[in-house]
Amino acid sequence: MNGFRKGLFATLIAIAFPLAQADAATSTFDGTWNVRISSSSETCGNGATVAIGINNGQIASSSTAVTASGRVANAGGINVILSTGIKRAVGFGRLSGSSGSGTWRGALCTGTWTAEKI
């Protein structure tokens, strides 16, 4: 992984979508999702994509380079943390049908994300 992507993943990797405690979603959102992470800051990079899996509303990474955890509520609100090494990013958002979007923040960077179910 090149330095640009590595830095972006390190900062964004903990996309934790703060969400009020909610029960795990039904299988509506279960499956593999591609999450595109964007930042308006050149220092933070732009355009990384991470694959995550959702099973019974629980989030896990589909990549060995990125650790993902969190949950999707029945209404589609998503709470997730992505991390790689000591870097992490947190965020929040909503899934609806086979797509979703939201915002994220890391120690030094912020941005948006979009997701598409594969």
Image (spheres, helix red, strand yellow):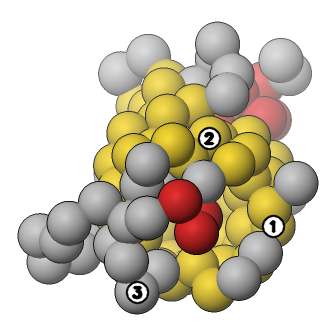
Q: CA distance from mark 2 to mark 1?
A: 11 Å
SS for tag 2?
Answer: strand
Q: Residue at x 43, y 64 (%)?
A: 26
Place of residue 70 in the rendered image (x, y in percent of width and height, measured from the top left): 34, 49
Q: Residue at x 64, y 42 (%)?
A: 52
**Can see residue 3?**
yes
Between 96 and 7, which is closer to the camera in this rendering? 96
Amino acid type, callout 3? Ala
Q: Which numbered tag is attached to residue 75?
A: 3
Place of residue 42 in the rendered image (x, y in percent of width and height, measured from the top left): 75, 62
Amino acid type, callout 2? Gly
Which quadrant of the figure has residue 98? bottom right
* Of labels 1 and 3, the one closer to you: 3
Q: Earlier in the sequence, mark 2 or mark 3?
A: 2
Amino acid type, callout 1? Glu
- The residue labelled by disc 1 is 116
- Image marks 1 and 3: residues in contact by CB distance under 8 Å: no
Q: Residue at x 86, y 21 (%)?
A: 2
Answer left or right for 85 relative to 113. Answer: left
SS for tag 1?
Answer: strand
Between 99 and 89, which is closer to the camera in this rendering? 99
The quadrant the N terminus occupies is top right
Q: Earlier in the sequence, mark 1 or mark 3?
A: 3
Q: Is residue 68 above or below residue 40?
A: above
Q: Is residue 107 above or below residue 92?
A: above
Q: Residues within 10 Å of mark 1 (few under 14, many from 20)?
A: some
- The residue labelled by disc 2 is 53
Q: Residue at x 81, y 67 (%)?
A: 116
Q: Earlier in the sequence, mark 2 or mark 1?
A: 2
